[in-house]
């Protein structure tokens, strides 16, 4: 080969080598950046809980409505599901490790759900017969003004499930009634974030913080006899196995419903009846009395159940006399020490749902 051609060939090879080195360098930097970003994000997600004096370190920290808040790397979905939920019979929450890491305590996060969105909620509160009052919601947000507040609409719920529990997304979309979707979302929020969930027909008289002290889960019973727990008011640390048990049974119940919906299906598939059944099974032989009300130690965790006349339930659902008396007391400013709020039982979920047998 002539010298000129030789030199040209060498130059070409050198250029190719330099380009390869540049590409390799850029690729290496990208891997490091992506790895760092994912590591930070996974670390934030896996922290899950906080001490009682701090808001949680989550991907959604400080965001009120999450509609456009979450767009995490799709490739992390499987890893998240494996780490946070799908561990078979192995508990994904160690009470002692949680307390050692965070100081313990239920995170200061308040959840409300209204899947039809903020605008529809604003419209409904202006209707006298809607069963919603803006002051009820405002009272709970105001009494927890230093908490992280999360208002979940359908879009934000779907983003959350797609990101954290992608295996459940199709099931969530497939529920034919909004009430079923709202019920299904609640245990996932408790499992992922923890904090306090309350329905929008609940009024708050004061902060719940004192009533949550020293507990890992706090539930509400609303009937005489105390052999029930409801899904309208509940608080928890994140990752507690009780929520795994609820979710597992919820999926099984809906599978057996075969798409049929009436009031019995709603109560059984994700409502209070399901919660009562799972609480009985979850606590096993630890119940000292037939009633659920009281303090329980289960799997190293502390569970409290408040009964009728305490926490958020002064009256049974259909006790009109009690509710009228309660309204008079509130109007006069006579708030009972044993109550932190009042569940008004608007019953809005019953609209359009056939009565069960």
Image: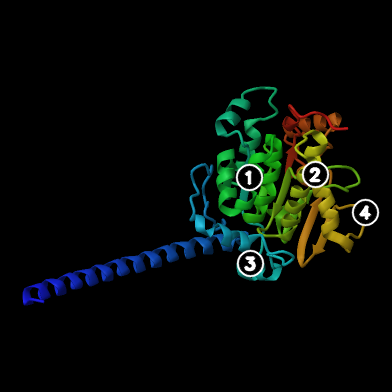
Dot 2 or dot 4, earlier in sequence: 2
Residue at mark 4 to residue at mark 3: CA–CA distance: 33 Å
Residue 322 picture location, percent across and down: 84, 33
Which of discs 2 and 3 lies nearer the camera? The answer is 2
Which of discs 3 and 1 lies nearer the camera? The answer is 1
Which of discs 2 and 4 lies nearer the camera? The answer is 2
Dot 2 or dot 3, earlier in sequence: 3
Residue at mark 3 to residue at mark 1: CA–CA distance: 37 Å
Vertical side of 186 occupied by 286: above or below: below
Query: Residue 127 appears in which quarter of the rendering?
Result: top right
Residue 232 picture location, percent across and down: 73, 42
Q: How crowded is mark 2: few (under 14 residues within 10 Å), some or many (20 or more)?
A: few
Q: Name the residue under label 4.
A: 290
Query: Residue 36 appears in which quarter of the rendering?
Result: bottom left
Can you tell which mark lies on residue 103? 3
Residue at mark 1 to residue at mark 4: CA–CA distance: 38 Å
Q: Is residue 204 visible?
A: no
Can you tell which mark lies on residue 256? 2
* Count of numbered badges drawn on the protein: 4
Vertical side of 315 occupied by 234: above or below: below
Q: Residue at x 72, y 30 (%)?
A: 348
Residue at mark 2 to residue at mark 1: CA–CA distance: 17 Å
Q: Disc 2 vs disc 3: Cβ atoms closer than 8 Å?
A: no
| Mark 4 secondary-structure assignment | loop
Q: Mark 1 points at which residue?
A: 170
Dot 1 or dot 4, earlier in sequence: 1
Dot 3 or dot 1, earlier in sequence: 3
């Amino acid at each position: 080969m002539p010298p000129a051609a030789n030199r040209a060939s060498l130059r070409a090879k050198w250029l190719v080598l330099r380009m390869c080195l540049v590409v390799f360098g850029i690729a290496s930097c990208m891997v490091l950046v992506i790895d760092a970003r994912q590591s930070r994000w996974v670390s934030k997600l896996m922290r899950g809980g906080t001490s009682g004096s701090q808001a949680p370190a989550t991907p959604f920290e400080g965001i009120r409505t999450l509609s456009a808040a979450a767009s995490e790397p799709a490739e992390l979905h499987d890893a998240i599901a494996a780490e946070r939920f799908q561990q078979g019979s192995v508990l994904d929450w160690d009470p002692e490790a949680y307390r050692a890491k965070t100081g313990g305590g239920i995170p200061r996060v308040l959840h409300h759900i209204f899947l039809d969105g903020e605008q529809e909620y604003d419209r409904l509160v202006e209707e006298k017969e809607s069963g919603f009052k803006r002051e009820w919601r405002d009272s709970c947000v105001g009494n927890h003004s230093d908490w992280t507040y999360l208002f979940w609409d359908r879009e934000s719920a779907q983003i959350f499930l797609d990101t954290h529990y992608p295996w459940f997304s199709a099931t969530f979309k497939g529920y034919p009634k909004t009430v079923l979707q709202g019920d299904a979302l609640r245990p996932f929020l408790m499992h992922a974030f923890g904090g306090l969930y309350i329905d929008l027909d609940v009024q708050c008289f004061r902060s719940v913080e004192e009533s949550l002290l020293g507990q890992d889960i706090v539930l509400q019973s609303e009937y005489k006899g105390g052999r029930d727990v409801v899904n309208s008011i509940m608080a928890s640390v994140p990752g507690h196995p009780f929520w795994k048990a609820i979710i597992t049974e919820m999926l099984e119940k809906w599978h057996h419903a075969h798409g049929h919906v009436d009031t019995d299906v709603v109560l059984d598939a994700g409502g209070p009846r399901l919660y009562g059944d799972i609480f009985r099974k979850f606590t096993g032989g630890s119940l000292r009395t037939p009633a659920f009300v009281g303090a329980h130690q289960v799997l190293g965790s502390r569970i409290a159940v408040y009964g009728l006349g305490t926490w958020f339930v002064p009256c049974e659902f259909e006790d009109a006399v009690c509710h009228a008396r309660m309204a008079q007391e509130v109007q006069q400013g006579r708030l009972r020490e044993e109550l932190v709020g009042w569940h008004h039982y608007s019953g809005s979920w019953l609209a359009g749902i056939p009565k069960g047998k």
